[in-house]
Image (cartoon, rainbow, N blue to C red):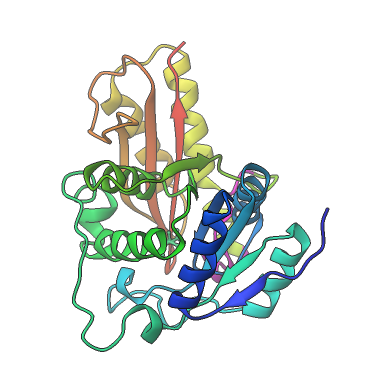
Amino acid sequence: MAERKPEVIHDPKELQSRLAELRKQGKKIGLVPTMGALHYGHLSLAIAAKEENDISVVSIFVNPKQFAPNEDFDKYPRILEKDLDLLEQIGVDFAFVPSSSDMYPVGFDANVHVGGVSEILEGSFRPTHFDGVATVVLKLFLITGADTAYFGQKDFQQVAVVRKMVRDLNVPIDIVSCPIIREKDGLALSSRNRYLSEEERKSALILYEALGQAEFMIHSGTRNAAAVKAELRRMIEAVPDAEIDYIEIADPASLIEMENIAGNVVVLLAVRIGKTRLIDNMIVQPK
Ligand code: PAF
């Protein structure tokens, strides 16, 4: 694998003009938006961005606008040097590491609200979250002028919100969703897994087990979504430290709840394990 330090750029205007110059030379730009604390899930996106473009950019910015006051903004892991070492191993070209005041200077007053898909599921539990995500992601798209942006399927609803924003606002960018990367035992990689104690880490496996059960039931012919959800609820409620925020079976494109499982569905879970809130999902195709 190539080993080259990414060029670290803090100033949005500088990145914007550097990438505009490269675009003029006909270079294709791939962007991976992240909040740092990188794990292999992020790196798989960076690898795709590198393979499919001339220039790869990874942004690292813990975006205050997507955290509610009671959430983990202050304790969110910030390990920039380690992140840069990982990006060097992949040979990413640019790391964009703006400060909060670079992204939101005094007087900043814009807000991107994507109606519909951002208001259900995560949106009902975290009502300001997707406005914060859409606002920062649109800024990143405009700063980089990227041709393609890469997101992880683990944040399934986030990808749906970003796709809808791009469609509604005619943003000239392709959105690629890359598969969830899991530990050997099935736990989906997440920067928040590091908050889990050893015991909680064991309890957290229930998310993947529940998704596996949903897949099994659907493949075995269950078409009643309520029956699948009730079984998942029973399984998760039996686990110590686990508290369900939601279990949903939805249409993968619109995220609208499905009562009857007729075609592909996405099974979505948000579960609190102790103080750590985890999300996971699986697309299931009835046989
Ligand atoms: O998925 C994330 O890490 C964040 O929501 C994103 C897309 C980088 C926006 O801050």
User: Residue 194 placed where, x, y %?
Assistant: 59, 68
Image height check: is 51 above or below 250?
Answer: below
Image height check: is 229 above or below 182?
Answer: above
Q: Residue furthest bottom?
A: 106
User: Residue 220 placed where, x, y %?
Assistant: 46, 13
Within the magenta stretch, is there residue 194?
Answer: yes
Image height check: is 63 above or below 193?
Answer: below
Determine whether, in the image, residue 20 is placed left or right of residue 102. right
Query: How many marks do you count on the picture?
Result: 0
Q: Residue furthest front?
A: 25
User: Residue 174 placed where, x, y %?
Assistant: 43, 42
Determine whether, in the image, residue 213 is placed left or right of residue 258. right
In this picture, which residue range is highlighted in magenta?
Answer: 186-198
Residue 145, picture quadrant: bottom left
Front residue of 123 and 12 = 12
Determine whether, in the image, residue 181 is placed left or right of residue 254. right
User: Residue 243 placed where, x, y %?
Assistant: 36, 56
Image height check: is 104 above or below 266?
Answer: below
- For the point 40% across and 44% down, the residue is 156
Residue 191 in view of the camera = no
Q: Quadrant of ligand 1?
A: bottom left
- For the point 41% across and 46% down, the residue is 173
- For the point 20% across and 71% down, the residue is 110
Residue 274, picture quadrant: bottom left
Q: Residue furthest left?
A: 115
Within the magenta stretch, is there residue 287?
Answer: no
Residue 112 in view of the camera = yes
Front residue of 252 and 86 = 86
